[in-house]
Amino acid sequence: MSQDRIRIIIAIAVIAAMHAVYTGYQVSHRHFFLGPDSFEYIHAAENLPSGVLYSGDRAQPIDTDLYTKRPILYPLILAGVFRIHHSEVAVILLQMLIAIGTAFLAIRFMRELDIIPSRRGVLILFACLAATPSHFMYANFIMTETVLQAIVLGMTLMVFLFLSRGHMRYLIGYQCLLVAAMLTKPVFYLFVIPSLLYWAWLSLRIRTARPLTAAIIPVLAVILVTGWNYSRTGYAQYSSIQTLGLFYYNTYYFLIKTKGDAYAKTAIADIETAAAREKSYADRTKLIHRTCGALLRSEAVGYALFHARGMMTFFLDPGRFDFHNFFGMSSDNTGLLYHFSRGGFRAAALYLSRQPPALIVSIIVVMLGNVLKIAGAGVFLFSPRVRLEFRIFAVGIIFYVAFATGPLGATRFAVPILPILFICLAALLSRVTRPGKMA
């Protein structure tokens, strides 16, 4: 057995051991559910055998938003697991295996790019992984993040393989994985736009229409899902999460920032009252979009700055919310996003300073790791030994997720792109510890 293969086996064994620690804790303490999100996925899985995609309890009054809020792929996975063994532990074990498989794929990817750092760099890479607890925590929640992480890394690998080998199967593989990403989490349905632009640009560079032609596949998928949702709710949208996010996060937290807590709550309540007067679900949804859109457009510059600051938080968020939920720690209901929205970074820092000392230390370590990963992305974008077209895609998908997350800016939304960030970090460490290889 070659030394290279032995090193990969050791690396995977270490990563598996790290996952086992988190999974062992979770199985013992059973904090499998992350707010209402986890229960909505479970409801959707339990409703699927009846031929209905609905992420609520059908014994309760129907909430039309729940017909389209959660896409079908993750509930399908849950339904499949529950059919074999109806246990949250079974789901967690499957997700742990997926996460370990994703780590193996990321390591192989680093080899393909020739950015495996020296021994010292590898140690830093593992220290940074240990300082990224969200990667391990979300593999142990009933949540989509680990599955989506594997899909996004697969998409990125397909782009690399198409660029380096030119086979059509990699191009089709990418488009199918993008469809899978959209069917896992709605945030990726809008990625069809930058994806289409990317493949159009690449078609011009390599002088063939194949990439642009294949890029129509996810566009058709968006049209089909939107049409299906229209037939079920009377309103054409990919997912109701668009409306809920615009209303209860983008608008609400922007109003907290600009007008204060009391004003924000009153404004949201007034919009809810006005929407309730509308006769149909479509009219209610249109009113929310119209009202929130007009409000944000009226302060476009202020909102743009607010959105940009949320993107910064996306990269730096230390994951206080994750620690509290994973370890079952007591917490008030406001959270870091609330304090950040009210008073910016100063208010967020003051709020963090009031946390338990062990949590503060953990948060500082996580933030240092986040800074390293950001630096890695910056270095990777300008790494001359990696093909420009691939660098643009890899950093572009990181930026897209940050932009789409916007004011939410929480560490959980970065989990799907963590392998790409670690590949970028490996490029930085390779450049530092193997300067001759990255010159």
Image (cartoon, grey):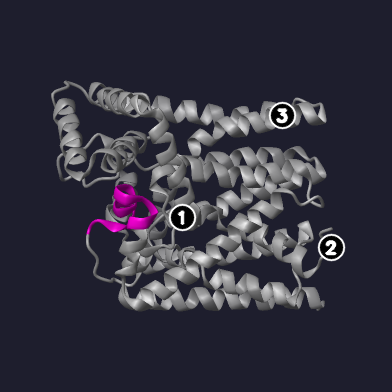
In the displayed structure, does residue 263 sit left or right of residue 54?
left
Quadrant in the picture for the C terminus: bottom right
Q: Is residue 358 visible?
A: yes
Q: Position of residue 196 (x, y in %)?
A: 62, 30
Which residue is at 50% across, 34% downward? 190
Specify the amino acid type for callout 1. Glu
Quick one: SS at disc 1?
Answer: helix
- Location of mark 2 (residue): 437
**Residue at horizontal 77%, vertical 63%?**
431
- Provide the residue designation for mark 3: 201
Query: Which residue position holds label 1?
Result: 145
Q: Amino acid at mark 2?
A: Lys
Q: Nearer the viewer, mark 2 or mark 3?
A: 2
Q: Quadrant of residue 150?
A: bottom right
Q: Which residues are magenta?
A: 333-347
Where is residue 274 drawn, in percent x and y? 16, 26
Instruction: Say which element carries label 2.
Output: loop
User: Disc 3 marks which amino acid?
Assistant: Trp
Label whose residue precedes the other's in the sequence (2 or 3): 3
Count of all numbered marks drawn on residues in the image: 3
Q: What kind of secondary structure does the magenta stretch mostly adopt?
A: helix
What is the x, y in percent for residue 306?
40, 41
The residue sitting at 59% across, 56% down in the picture is 374
User: Which residue is outermost to the right?
Assistant: 436
Using the image as rendered, state which of residue 258 and residue 383 is in the foreground: 258
Sequence order check, earlier mark of 1 and 3 = 1
